[in-house]
Amino acid sequence: MSAVLDDYVDEQSTEAMVNRGAERALLGSLLLDNRLYDVVGDMVLPKHFFSEFDGAIYAAICSQIVAGRACDAVSVFEQMRGRVELQYLAGLAHDGVVSQSLARRHAEIIVSRYGSRQLAAVVEDAREVAANHLLPIAERVEQVSAKLASLVEDAPGDDWVDLQDGMVEFLNGVQERVDGRIPDFQPTGLRDLDEKLDGGLRGGELVIIGARPSMGKTALAVSIGMNCAERGETTAMFSLEMQRSHLQNRQVAMTAEIALSKIKRPERLSQFEWSQMTAAVERIRRYPFHVNDHTSLNINKLRTKARALKRRKGLRLLIVDYLGLMEGTDPKANRTTQLGDITRNLKKLSKELGIPVIVLAQLNREVEKRVDQMPILSDLRDCGEVEQDADIVLFVHRPIQSKPDLGPVWANYARVRIAKQRGGATGDIDLRYVGEHVKFQDWDGERPSGYGKQRSSDL
């Protein structure tokens, strides 16, 4: 009776450490929709499967998807010929579900069960270590602690590196940049701004562009993005505020240098402007600029879509327009907490993908109550953590918007303040804003008189 009871307990314990349903469902889901790899590929490894056989199937699926090849039961059968039956793979596909949320949940279950099995193994080893009275108790505790610590996997890139290896890596990186093999930064295309940013925007940087409404923060971000795409660098923009068609109007207007109002009302275009417009369309249709204008976007959805685009197209710059319209993952949390979570995760995403992420942010009304309405860091709306997480904070101000009586000399003048830059200079940049073309350009000549000259030390 005791032996039967022991067998029953062992069977129940094994079931608690494995979820075969989740493993089969995940494999089947990937066979049905290869795009789900972008949701789980960063989480699940072949070793996480209870069965080495199923782990091998997962590895075969991943290798085909990463190689950019379509993958289904037949292609996996062909790759693993002699090691798996086609009927078994068809059964897996039958168990699959095409759902990002379910695929992620199944992945979490698989990884959790793997961790449980690893923990159980450590506990079993700990029993043997505890019984070894030849070792001092402190040494036994240290052995068990080390095994427990090994269960916690560090995030990619978080391994300790000493200066011996670090300096070799540094010099190799410098040489690669000198040789042009690895671009060190993404130029914004705006001369004075690039000078202040020591060349441009760098991978891993979270860049905030803040302004009051109608100051041109979207136009500045799109100008930077179009300059990047024109160089052949894959650029993506999550446009939560503006429909894709409206953004396309702006892109054509700024490239063709035709008034946006005429793009919206094409019957007003002259014959010459028609030819300008069609030439611009032919030019920019080749730009690798991708737009997603879906609403109800939270950080988890954004991260999944950005990772997928990075894997498929080699993403180099990401723009989010704008922070205030993003949803938090916890609807019960207050808005300040939600925004803090969003900016932290956007910073993590920029480091993970190795790209600059530009996020547009609305400023509070306090800026309008001051005589000098040039924004400062405390004007960032709703969340002080935005300032904390950002590597660079840019503020856009056009005096003519707040003081229409300044006169025509101010019509195209814009000032961009670098209010924060980790390891770099702060200060003000003069830019030209061409309103009818919704684009920013370099400012040539003297600043309009009467505005005052505030230096970096005054910020």
Image: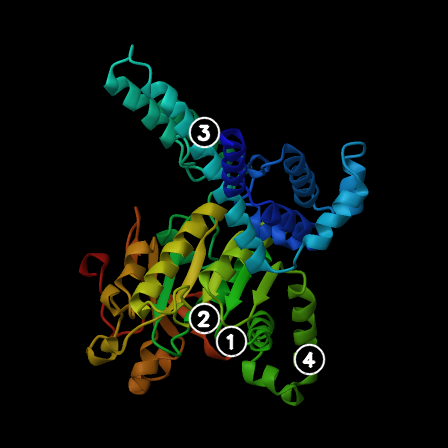
Q: Which mark is on residue 365? A: none
Who comes first in sequence, dot 4 or dot 1? 1
Could you tell me if the residues under marks 2 and 3 are in contact, i.e. CB atoms within 8 Å?
Answer: no
Residue drawn at the location 38% of the way across and 19% of the way down: 128
Rendering coords of residue 178 (x, y %):
49, 35
Q: Which mark is on residue 274? A: 4
Residue at the far top in the pictured view: 134
Name the residue beneath numbered marker 3.
Answer: 121
Residue drawn at the location 55% of the way across and 81% of the way down: 260
Q: SS of the residue at dot 4? A: helix
Mark 1 or 2: in front is 1
Q: SS of the residue at dot 1? A: loop
Mark 4 or 3: in front is 3
Quarter of the C terminus within the rendering: bottom left
Mark 2 or 4: in front is 2
Question: Height in image: 207 above or below 202?
Answer: below
Marks 1 and 3, how far apart at CA: 54 Å
Who comes first in sequence, dot 4 or dot 3? 3
Residue at the far front in the pictured view: 1
Residue drawn at the location 51% of the way across and 38% of the way down: 114
Who comes first in sequence, dot 2 or dot 3? 3
* Amino acid at the residue labelled 4: Trp
Q: SS of the residue at dot 3? A: helix
Depth check: give the residue in front, 24 or 251: 24
Who comes first in sequence, dot 1 or dot 2? 2
Q: Which mark is on residue 242? A: 1
Could you tell me if the residues under marks 1 and 2 are in contact, i.e. CB atoms within 8 Å?
Answer: yes
| Residue 190 picture quarter | bottom left
Rendering coords of residue 225 (x, y %):
52, 61
Q: Which mark is on residue 218? A: 2
